Image (cartoon, rainbow, N blue to C red):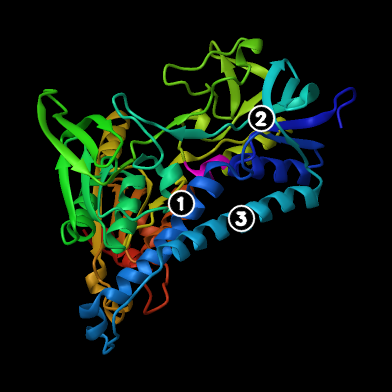
């Protein structure tokens, strides 16, 4: 431990990012403390990844067992399928408790000091912790900020946590409204539409932008819309935004055209989920004590080594990771950033390769991607002087998918024409969140279609959908 300090490293925020940083720091011999005022595990464990996946798992089983046509095609017939909403909610809550306990115990077992309270920077190499009993100051060689994010609620929308709510309350599944409006068709909106539609709710999906699933590859989005939205009890309103949302019974939603701002209609629904993204939780971190200003979107400015910047210059001994940096608001990105921050604290220069970090929406079927979208790849090509090409393959030609009668989906590979380097891969189909990791490794290693096309995949497996895409690229 550095002489004269209470700790080598103090981490503010015990979410997935802070947890990953703490475990790595301890393994590297750093005396480490982690400060948390709220729930251990942060958003991911308590209000995000973990409970939502539990709900998706349970509701997905209900959807599967109620799909009599699909089961009959496999030679299976069953009677009526019933479910218990509270039992499904309990499954999610119990999983949260288990993962939260596992996370906390792993920190304790390895010797990380857990300090409960509100932590903030109090100057260079100083942190204050405020609790019900008062305030104390801790000195530390280095500080990592990992405060996370909170749901974004647009102006005009009033949240009461009961009839109008965000994903924070949605994961508790306290009710199953007969008719629910979901504002936003990104990851959160898509996943909750999957849950609610499987459990019998009518849905109105409201998207302010001109297309559903903004940010997703357009080929993938069009196919996903055909499978995840069109055949289900989901009404869509595109290019329309919720000008005003008033909680109550019913919930009143005033809709307007996003471009012209012209009033359109008023909806009266049983509930409304606000799924309009997340914003950094960067208030009251004490950054002013070291001369750091947040950027215009309230993210903490950092360089590629995760060091905090002030006026473009590195602030000594201060680092930031996770959603609060605005790089990629994903739990596994936060964890990767935490490890990289510790590596740089120890003088081992490393950077996060954001292009190789995969992402997924855990709908039924799933959506996943890694690397660049086609427009982003085209823009890079114009900048650097190369052309791109794409290759597609379909689950309807995959033996394993056909055996399971689950053959809706496709894989799309984006690559450079000159070198064959894979720039991005997008998948919609069964187990897409698992399949994407082969592509993520290829992107991380800057592999080409010329090498990937000769890899051997077990047959019959879903992974062959990527094998086929690589081989098609080679002969195109």
Residue 144 bears which disc, if any? Answer: 2
Left-right relation of 100 to 161: right
Q: Tell whether position 333 is magenta.
A: yes
Q: Position of residue 41 (x, y in %)?
A: 61, 45
Q: CA distance from mark 2 to mark 1?
A: 31 Å
Give percent across and percent down for residue 100: 63, 52
The residue under label 3 is: 97
The residue carrying pointer 1 sits among few (fewer than 14), some (14 to 19) or many (20 or more) residues within 10 Å by Cα, namely some
**Of 98 and 134, which appears nearest the observer?**
134
Please provide percent x and percent y for residue 367: 33, 55
The residue segment tinted magenta is 330-334
Label 2: element kind: strand
Instruction: Give the quadrant of the C terminus.
Output: bottom left
Nearer the camera: disc 3 or disc 1: 1
Is residue 5 visible in the rendered image? The answer is yes
Residue 434 image-quadrant placement: bottom left
Callout 2 crowding tier (Cα within 10 Å): few <14, some 14–19, many ≥20:
many
**Please, what secondary structure does the residue beneath circle 1 have?**
loop
């Amino acid at each position: 431990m550095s002489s004269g300090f209470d700790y080598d490293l103090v981490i503010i925020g015990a979410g997935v990012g802070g947890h990953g940083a703490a475990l790595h720091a301890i393994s590297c011999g750093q005396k480490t403390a982690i400060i948390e005022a709220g729930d251990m595990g942060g958003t991911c464990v308590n209000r995000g990844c973990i409970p939502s996946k539990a709900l998706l798992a349970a509701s997905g089983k209900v959807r599967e067992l109620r799909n009599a046509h699909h089961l009959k095609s496999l030679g299976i017939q069953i009677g009526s399928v019933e479910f218990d909403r509270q039992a499904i909610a309990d499954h999610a809550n119990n999983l949260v408790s288990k993962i939260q306990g596992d996370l906390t115990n792993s920190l304790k077992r390895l010797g990380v000091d857990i300090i409960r309270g509100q932590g903030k920077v109090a100057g260079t190499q100083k942190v204050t912790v405020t609790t019900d009993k008062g305030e104390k100051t801790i000195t530390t060689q280095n500080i990592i900020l990992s405060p996370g994010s909170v749901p974004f609620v647009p102006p005009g929308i009033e949240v009461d946590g009961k009839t109008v709510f965000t994903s924070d309350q949605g994961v508790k599944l306290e009710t199953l409204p007969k008719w629910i409006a979901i504002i936003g068709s990104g990851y959160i909106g898509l996943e909750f539409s999957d849950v609610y539609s499987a459990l019998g709710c009518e849905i109105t999906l409201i998207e302010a932008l001109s297309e559903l699933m903004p940010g997703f590859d357009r080929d993938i989005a069009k196919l996903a819309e055909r499978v995840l939205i069109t055949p289900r009890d989901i009404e869509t309103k595109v290019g329309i935004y919720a000008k005003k949302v008033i909680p109550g019974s019913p919930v009143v939603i005033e809709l307007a055209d996003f471009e012209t701002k012209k009033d359109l209609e008023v909806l009266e629904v049983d509930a409304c989920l606000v799924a309009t993204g997340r914003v950094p939780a960067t208030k009251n971190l004490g950054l002013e004590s070291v001369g750091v200003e947040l950027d215009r979107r309230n993210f903490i400015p950092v360089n590629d080594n995760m060091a905090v910047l002030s006026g473009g210059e590195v602030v000594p001994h201060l680092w930031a990771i996770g959603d609060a940096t605005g790089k990629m608001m994903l739990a596994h990105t936060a964890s990767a950033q935490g490890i990289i921050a510790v590596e740089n604290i120890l003088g081992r220069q490393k950077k996060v390769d954001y292009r190789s970090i995969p992402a997924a929406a855990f709908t039924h079927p799933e959506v996943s991607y890694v690397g660049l979208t086609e427009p982003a790849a085209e823009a890079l090509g114009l900048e650097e002087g190369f052309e791109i090409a794409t290759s597609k393959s379909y689950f309807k030609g995959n033996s394993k998918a056909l055996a399971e009668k689950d053959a809706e989906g496709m894989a799309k590979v984006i690559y450079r024409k000159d070198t064959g380097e894979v720039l991005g891969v997008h998948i919609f189909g069964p187990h897409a969140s698992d399949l994407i990791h082969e592509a993520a490794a290829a992107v991380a290693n800057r592999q080409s279609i010329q090498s990937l096309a000769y890899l051997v995949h077990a047959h019959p497996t879903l992974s062959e959908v990527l094998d086929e895409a690589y081989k098609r690229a080679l002969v195109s």
